[in-house]
Image (cartoon, rainbow, N blue to C red):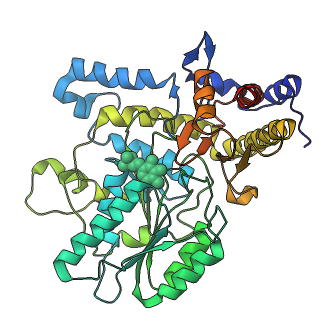
Amino acid sequence: MTFQNTLEFAQQLDAQDDLKDYRNEFIFPQHNGKEVIYFTGNSLGLQPKRTKKYVDDVMNDWANLAVEGHFYSEKPWWDYHERFANPLSKLVGAKPSEITVMNTLTVNLHLLMVSFYRPTKTRYKIICEEKAFPSDQYMFQSQVDFHSRNFGINKEDAIVEIKRREGEHNIRLEDILAKINEVGDELALVLIGGVNYYTGQVFDMKAITEVGHKAGAVVGFDLAHAAGNIKLELHDWNVDFAAWCSYKYMNSGPGNASGCFIHEKHHQADLPRFAGWWGHNKERRFKMEPTFDPVHGADGWQISNLPILSLAPYLASVELFAEVGMDKLIQKRNQITAYLEFVLREIDKEIDGTEFEIITPTNQEERACQLSVLLHGQGRSLFDYLMKNGVITDWREPNVIRFAPAPFYCSYEDMYNFGQILKQGILKG
Ligand SMILES: *Cc1c(COP(=O)(O)O)cnc(C)c1O
């Protein structure tokens, strides 16, 4: 499709958009009496209007039923998490038994590493991407430290980062695969973000998993920026484990619960895990037995009594996703991201063509709903101008702005209007 950078053209795309009515399902912050242009759905998704009812229902059940709400509310609390298995498994390409929801993301990755990072003196290395999300970096360092105190694995070379080549912004798949093969017999775990948070690059998880397994390693993914954003086939790709947060593209609210995937091939295996009573045999959980007998499947990794007030907004959001399905979201995501790219390039051309550079891959297979823009002209002041003028974006040091036009609620008209504000901001600067 040939795009045009005009209001009429953007409105025409909106009129043809299958998802246009879903914009009304979300609550937008206001700026000077108008809805903001929201580009940070990759950081904290907007609140769906239906979410409040899910939370109110829990509050009402708690008021009316108190402890009996565990069993007698309309959505009983004791197995509330099981409501996620079907819809979430479809969103990430898993079997329902491979899915559970609990805790928060970094906590879950640590817990999964208890089962899936089992270093020995000779096979102890972890492969991750350079400049991984800081929480992941701290996690790797602390896991390695923990194991090194127990039996002296070499802390100094245990974490192997895959680097970008000189002058390039993205990591090449061939370099990831080559590094896996190079580390070979020493490789215990590959754990990479499915979508890089900084550049928006999407990694080929299928290829990485296959080559990781050939090297004898376990392969997991941090799907913080992938869940609700890209097509995932975790089961078929044979991924060992994965976890994601729910507050980014999945719109579940600040700091909310995390989803986990554990491939069914591991359900019967005698893997170590940190256990708690919510992972215990469901029928016998309240018999308060002394010996742990895990639930078969990912729910066997549950630990605590569920945070229902955190799961309720997540359930609202998962049901919204299930209603629409990833295919439609991905279709719009591709088009609106392409339109945003077009608008950015047009504005740059109209000025002098040197203001900024898009560092996200241009190839649609390698990107999803995010364009990261490296500013060459004005830096932070341009970001401040955008924020003051109702464009909510996100600043990353040293001089990158990330734009994520979430397909659920962003419009093509937003992209056009954003372009006009950006242009004013550059010309003023
Ligand atoms: C957002 C994000 C996190 C956040 O983890 P929490 O434990 O939910 O705070 C972790 N990893 C990546 C890659 C992220 O993008």
Please identify the quarter of the rendering in which residue 410 is found.
Answer: top right
Vertical placement of 420 versus 271: above or below? above
Residue 315 visible in this rendered orientation of the protein: yes
Quadrant assignment for the C terminus: top right
Residue 315 in percent (x, y) is at 44, 36
Could you tell me how many numbered marks the image carries? 0
Please give the name of the residue rendered at 71% of the width and 50% of the height, measured from the top-left corner: 358
Please give the name of the residue rendered at 53% of the width and 29% of the height, measured from the top-left corner: 46
Q: Which of 387 and 405 is in front in this view?
A: 387
Please give the name of the residue rendered at 86% of the width and 26% of the height, measured from the top-left corner: 12
- Residue 379 in the figure: left or right of residue 267: right
- Residue 197 in the figure: left or right of residue 260: right
Residue 285 in percent (x, y) is at 18, 51
Residue 255 in percent (x, y) is at 37, 38
Please identify the quarter of the rendering in which residue 199 is found.
Answer: bottom right
Q: Which of 133 and 86 is in front in this view?
A: 133
Residue 41 visible in this rendered orientation of the protein: no
Vertical placement of 413 versus 107: above or below? above
